Image (cartoon, rainbow, N blue to C red):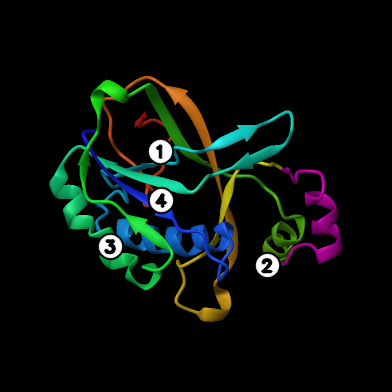
Amino acid sequence: MKYYIEVTLIKTDDFSPYELWSRIYTQLHIALAEIKDANNKVNIGISFPQYRFHAEKGIGFLGEKLRLFSQSENALEQLNIRKWLERLVDYVHVSSIREVPENKVTGYAIYKRKQFKTNAERLARHRVKRGDIGFDEALARYSHVVKTTNLPYIDMLSLSTSDEQDKKRFKLFIEKKPAEKSETQVFSTYGLSSEASVPEF
């Protein structure tokens, strides 16, 4: 990854950092979906340079910065993230496109989505739709598979349906892993990948 844009949250009384991340990341996801290929993949990856997670303490946070990376300046220009964040102009600072400072790179990391079965009631409702068991039985079956996590997350609204009532909130859990520099630079429409790494500096 040779080029990047940095997005920084501006402290405000209007929104908490969690609310801001939710608004920013929803716009980012839509922007990335606009440039996806036939396999729902993009060539732009993200990092959270202030990301922290302490598993033993059960504390995690994303920080107040996000970086968008690409191999080409042109890909970041096409993304035009300023346009997508223009309604949030009072709450974020968006840098110009910059070259990754190779002499300051301290390593590489993968930022990937981590999915958990976190809601037994939702799983039970989904199972009941099949029509072969009742809600109570389904709830009893799923209550033991529910997992909890303290990984940092962004509260998202599912945009995959046009019906306003069917839109559901979900937590986009983000896990960071140290990695080697990767040849593959393919990411999801969340800018995340389980294989492609981005530089840390």
- In this view, the residue in front, 182 or 146, is 182
Of circles 3 and 1, the one toward us is: 3
Q: Residue flagged by tag 1: what amino acid is it?
A: Ser
Q: Is residue 144 magenta?
A: yes
| Residue for badge 1 | 193
The residue beneath circle 4 is 190
Q: Earlier in the sequence, mark 2 or mark 3?
A: 3
- Which residue matches tag 3? 82
Chief secondary structure of the magenta portion: loop
Q: Are marks 2 and 3 in contact (CB under 8 Å)?
A: no
Identify the mark at residue 129; answer none if there is no mark.
2
Q: How far is disc 2 from disc 4 in space, using C-alphas?
A: 29 Å
Q: Give the mark toward the camera: 2 or 4.
A: 4
Look at the image and give the residue range highlighted in magenta: 129-148
**Dot 2 lies on which element?**
loop
Q: Spatial distance from mark 1 to mark 2, Cα to Cα?
A: 32 Å
Q: Is residue 134 visible?
A: no
Determine the image quadrant of residue 25. Answer: bottom left
The amino acid type, in three-letter code, at marker 4 is Tyr
User: Could you say whether the residue bearing mark 4 is in a helix, strand or loop?
Assistant: loop
Nearest-to-viewer mark from 4 and 3: 3
Q: Is residue 102 above or below residue 118?
A: above
x and y percent of residue 47 in the render? Answer: 41, 40
Q: How many marks?
A: 4
Residue 149, relative to residue 196: is it above or below?
below
